[in-house]
Amino acid sequence: MNYYLILGIFLAYSAILFIVSVFTSRRAGNKAYFLGNRQSPWPVVAYGMVGASLSGVTFISIPGWVGSSSFTYLMVVFGYLAGYFAITFILLPLYYRLNLTSIYTYLNQRFGFFSHKTGAFFFIISRLIGASFRMFLVINVLQLFIFDHLGIPFWASVLLFLCLITIYSFKGGIKTIVWTDMLQTTFMLASLLIIISTILDQTGYSARDIIQLANEKGLSKIIETDWKHDRFYLKQFFSGMFITIVMTGLDQDMMQKNLSCRSLKDAQKNMISLGFILIPVNLMFLYLGASLYLYAEHFALEIPQLSDDLFPMLALKHFGMLAGMIFFIGLIAAAYSSADSAITALTTSLSIDFLNLEGKVFLTEIKQIRLRYVLHFFITSLVFLTIVLFSLINNQAVIALLFTIAGYTYGPLLGLFAFGLISGYSVRDRLVPLIAILSPLICYFLSKHSEQFLWGYKFGFELLILNGILTFAGLWFIRKPKTTNNLNN
């Protein structure tokens, strides 16, 4: 494999993004950076969010996951659709009515200062971990198969990616990312289809043969009926629903793109469209996973011990030069789509939720923009350090690890927003950080001892729901008498 050719492709792809950013970031102030001046066309947002929702986790982990869990992940995806409906008709109307830039300012209006900071803090931790893991997954693969051969150390590869992302995103923010996400979704999906076509061509199988063989070998099982199993279908469905609510509806990264739409109706069209599009797209990734395992069996290839390594191993060592380059392009798209909007969202939250940049009327627009630049570079530095640290703990399928962590860090957000939307109570605001810390700790203890305490029951992704319930219960315990201040109507 010509590694310098691939490096050239990487730089050429980055150059395309720079060109897009030049046109989209013209005269871009803070309003353009944070909300794209609320002028983003909803079809562009919806299509681009497909790539942002999938990222490197879907691109690599889900195909590899088929070997151990078949198609059971599809029940999680069906739950996603239910979650998108909840976001569309419950959360989006609230965000637009309150004219929010950061969605966590709702917690300040509803409960107070400490609730607001707690929600924003848990988002920053959640997104920093999530985005870093996604980027680590992709860069680690590229490091093992390409950059090591060029003598580039891992930390330098990470720095290169983040510098390139910063160059095209730090000025235009969401205004630029809405359009670059559309480009990256296109490259990612095109790579998926071309790789599947390559597998069919080299094995001589038809698309129907793959389905038949996957059925015969137990790779296409969708519904797990054992209630104790961590992939029990009802647990998968409701976990998917609440994962979507918190990791999209309560996540500044994903909601910032929706809030850049021209109107509430456009944002709602975006959400519903995205929910339906993700079902066939994820099904195609599962189909790819079955194809990869059948390909390895057909040519008597050894399956890697770590499932995340299967797709890159086959693409870069067995499919041929062209397919390897196409895989590489899809992987680059996944890496960029994982990190650019996350860094922008983290910068937005730090600017609005902690530094109250919008409220600093004594600062000129130019000084506010300069301060935002500093925060953008600061967040990028944090992501860099986190990815390098995570390189030491890559010991399980990244998608499972990502959602497990999200079950702890997003759970308090779920409880806070649910209590604010459902109840009419205010809370003792100073005690909210304590509740938000205790709930994940209790969840961790229960998850470690659930088989002992709950007759062999194993927690899966539904740990997120339990975390939210415990937070809700804690808030109920510290509630005050009902207030007449109701932001939900």
Image: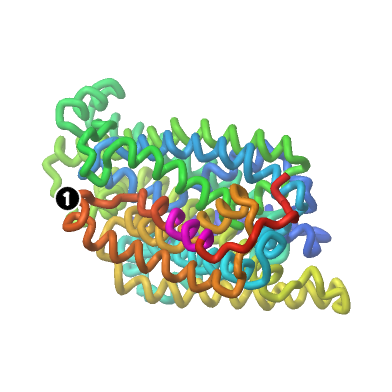
Total marks drawn? 1
Where residue 461 appears, as percent x and y from the top left, is 35, 50
Name the quadrant containing residue 44. Answer: top right
Viewer-closest of 397 and 199? 397
Q: Tell me the residue at 55%/69% (across/down).
A: 432
Say left or right for 188 vs 272: left
Say left or right for 245 vs 193: right
Say left or right for 356 vs 295: right
Name the quadrant containing residue 407. Answer: bottom left
Residue lying furthest front: 481
Q: Tell me the residue at 68%/78% (across/down).
A: 374
| 231 shown above or below 415 | above
Whether the magenta-drawn stretch holds residue 67 is answered as: no
Q: Label 1 neighbourhood size at 10 Å, few (<14), some (14-19), many (20+)? A: few
Residue range of the region highlighted in magenta in the rendering: 468-476
Whether the magenta-drawn stretch holds residue 474 is answered as: yes
Viewer-closest of 33 and 268? 268
Residue 410 seen anywhere in this rendered image of the structure: no
Quadrant (top left/top right/bottom left/bottom right) for the C terminus:
top right
Viewer-closest of 4 and 292? 292
Quadrant (top left/top right/bottom left/bottom right) for the N terminus:
bottom left
Where residue 352 appears, as percent x and y from the top left, is 71, 68
| 55 shown above or below 300 | below
Q: Which residue is mark 1?
A: 456
Three-letter amino acid code of the residue under disc 1 = Gly
Q: Tell me the residue at 32%/33% (across/down).
A: 287
Say left or right for 398 vs 347: left
